[in-house]
Image (tube, rainbow, N blue to C red):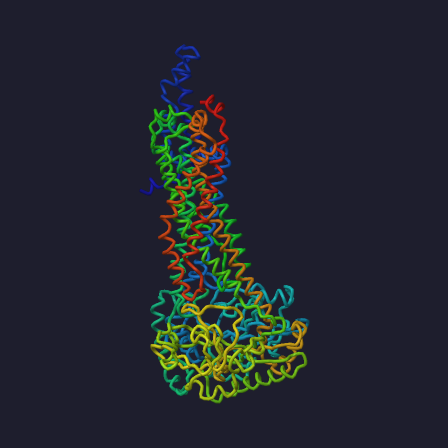
Amino acid sequence: MLNRMRLWLRSHLFRQRLEEEMQAEMAEHIDRSTKRLIARGLSPDEVRREAHLEFGNVGYLREEGRIARGTAWFDTLIADLRFGLRHFVRNPLSTLTIVAVLSVGIGINVVLFTLVYSFTDRPPSGVEMSDELVRIRGSQIGLNSRVERAFTREEIEAYAGLKMHFSAIAAWTSQPVTSAGPGVAETTVTATFVAGDYFELLGVQPVLGSGLVEDDAAQGAVLSHALWTRSFAEDPGVLGRTITFHDVPFTIVGIAPPRFRGASWEARDDMQVWLPLSGHRRVFPEIPSEAELFRAIARLQPGITHETAGAAVDVVAGRIMSDLDRAPSQDAFALGRDPSAEVVPLLADNLELGFEANARFVKLSFGVLGLLTLLVTCANVSALQTGLALARRREIAIRMSLGAQRVRVIRQLVTESLLLSILAAGAAVGVSLALMRVLLSIVGAFSFDLVFDRTTLLVTFGVALAAGLLFGLSPALHATRVAIAGALKDSAGSIAGGRARLQRGLVIAQIALTQPLAVCVATLVVLGVFEYRNSPRNPYGEQIVQVRLASASTRNIPITGDAAEDRERRETERLIEVFRQEPGITNAVYFPNRVPIDQDAFTLPDSARTGSDDVEPFYLVGRAVMPGYLDLIGTPIVLGRDLEPADTAGFPTAAIPVIIGDDMARSLWGDESPVGRRVEGIAAVEEPMMLEVVGVYEKSFDAPGHSRNPFTIFLPLDPRLASRSASRFIMLRTSSPAETMMPTIREIVRDEAPRAAITELHTLASAEGEERFVLWGAIALFSSGGLVVLLLCALGLYAVVAFAVGQRTGEIAVRMAIGARTRQIVRHFASDGLRLGVFGIVIGLPLSVLGLRMLMQLAPQTPPVSLPAITAIVAVGVLLVAGLATWIPASRAAEVDPALTLRKE
């Protein structure tokens, strides 16, 4: 067995040398026979002939030798590839068309795979994949479901004690801070305070310097590559320099690699710094140690599975129940019960609960989309290949008449298809890189690392080979099923109509698959245009400033009488008062937070119904605001009053005063006054919530109130909600364009809240502009995708009609010679192509309905757009594209010269 394997490897690895040795040995045998025959006195001509007759057929014996060595297939493959390349050179237009279509289809699939693979299976950016790297993820029971939680210091220490399960464990907590230094502009960065061998555990080596040392006296800092580039211009002499964070000095000891963003990129900011955990109390001394919460990663011991380690950490998590019992149970916002922990692979975006369900959904939806795109592409190319293969029927018939087996010819045609797909795979790499660059320019940075690596490259060529088999095998089987005598007698300009049956079927299948894709893309475009047109454009946007300050507190368990919490509240109130007194600033309020309303839906109480008809349940989006917010953003209150500070009294047990939009008022109460009316929540778990209308604001655009389009209401800002927020939002109104006031605003924050880091500072107009830019980019992206789908559809139909015209020139010439008019010829071929389009649309209609239903399940709260109208418009559009694609080659049929064509025949 081993000897046979050795000989097989030798015959393949040293094929050329063995070939030369075989030819030399055969030549030596013939030379010996020649010398022997010359010695017998034969003439030179007879000697050479007799020597070859005595030895046998040299070519046949060479083939037998190759077969014996097992390398004949390789020689055949080389010959097929050489023949295929010559065929492509002789037909450049069809070759380029097929490669272009395939590269687009494969490129789209590669982009979809890269997105799915990067989101569901890749580790954090800059971290190498390892089965031993895991994330310890905590959870607890929230209001209605299990939610993610962080860990206390004691819990982290307990996990670190599981030496049989973990070889190393590291914890961290992140917060925005203000950085400064000699010659460095003040900026806001995300500081990650790490415990344990954080960098060593992740396998990350700084590009300059070293990692952090876990020591209470350590004052080192590792800067992100982006922070090093922007603040220090990549100066290699930065090591050892001092930089301050919230006025606390640290020494720069290292620079992180360019792609590294930490174990989880929560802040979505490249401006980062990693500090030792001991520095957290120096930077935030007001935060008590019991209020610090962390997240954790670990490296498993060899042989330990995720399930085994998960069971161990879950036992540890159960021990914190006694600590939770000390939390004030009367607090409505207390931490949920039933804490638990689990061990999951360390991935880029699986910090939150529900990641696994989202990952399964993403894989399924993107997989279906990629499969449909690949099927449309393969159907298109198969139609082209079928026409090209039928055009070569005389060549195929001649080869088979000379003794070539059908299997051999099929292998030749499939090899050509695979060669085309490999060429397209190379082009698809460029297409996918261009598409990913466009996607990144529209969306911005992803939370995961979107890279083109070896796995993606293997998938690219794997998809290409699969596509080559899909679009190449069927045309090859069809083209070789010919009667040799009939094919040799057929003229070059005629072909039986039945031969194109497969090609027609492929085009119908392509249109049937194209229509649902086009309908879904068109729906997304219409929804994007609707959102773009209705996106907020505040006329005072240049005078409204949004300020976001990072909260110093890291906990999510409120503690009664917490000094840090009271200090932040007083600090924010003082900031608002100072802003209001500043010349040029006319008003300052809290930014409206989106408040989760834990109700399934809302309806009207029986006492508030108008008429006898029941009111369909509706949905609400709540925003908690301070009094004066609507006046600040320039939204007039057309009925009733504004919110007042006294409205929070009795909150949330009493009926909550709210301000509704005039669209909601018209939808529920018509022309009657809604002031004083109430709406009641529908909840399966929580107590029903009662809302009382105290005012009506004017909507900036008319949005009909229906059950899938939630109304926006404004309710009083609960102080407890503000104190729990990890960030503080403030909105300012200036008397003139606010850009000139930005330095003043920064200076006020610096003076009144020196320990608050500004994480956002921009005008409302710029925020609205960024939102519209993203919407416009999405519209352009979906529109481009729809055009590509229609282009693929048009190419298939164009190829069918053009092929029919090219193969039936003799028939066209005869028709015109006996009196057929030009428009009759054009109508004949155009109607043939249109029939294919109609059949495809009829077959694709159920698929379109199914696709729309799935799309609506993804986004149940969609704007009021007419989906049947979109489907009808897309069907008409596909039919028009089909008509154009058939009319162009059909019109060329009328240009046939009967005299020249019949003379050639």
Q: Position of residue 710 (x, y in %)?
A: 44, 71
> Quarter of the image holding residue 633?
bottom right
Between 861 and 609, the residue placed more toward the observer is 609
Residue 179 in the image: above or below residue 524: below
Q: Quadrant of the N terminus?
A: top left
* x and y, in percent, of residue 824 in the image: 44, 33
Horizontal side of 575 relative to 53 (left or right) equals right
**Is 599 rendered above or below residue 649?**
above
Position of residue 32 in the picture relative to residue 446 (left or right): left
* Residue 403 on image: x %, y %: 35, 26
Q: Residue furthest left?
A: 1
Residue 174 placement (x, y as % from top left): 51, 74
- Does residue 589 show up? yes
- Give the total of numbered labels: 0
* Residue 279, visible in the rendered structure: no
Answer with the quarter of the image where residue 706 lies: bottom left
Is 452 drawn above or below residue 77 in the view shown? below
Residue drawn at x 56%, y 62% is 773
Q: Nearer the viewer, residue 838 or 549?
A: 838
Q: Nearer the viewer, residue 259 or 862?
A: 862
* Quarter containing the C terminus: top left
Above or below, 577 against 258 in this view is below
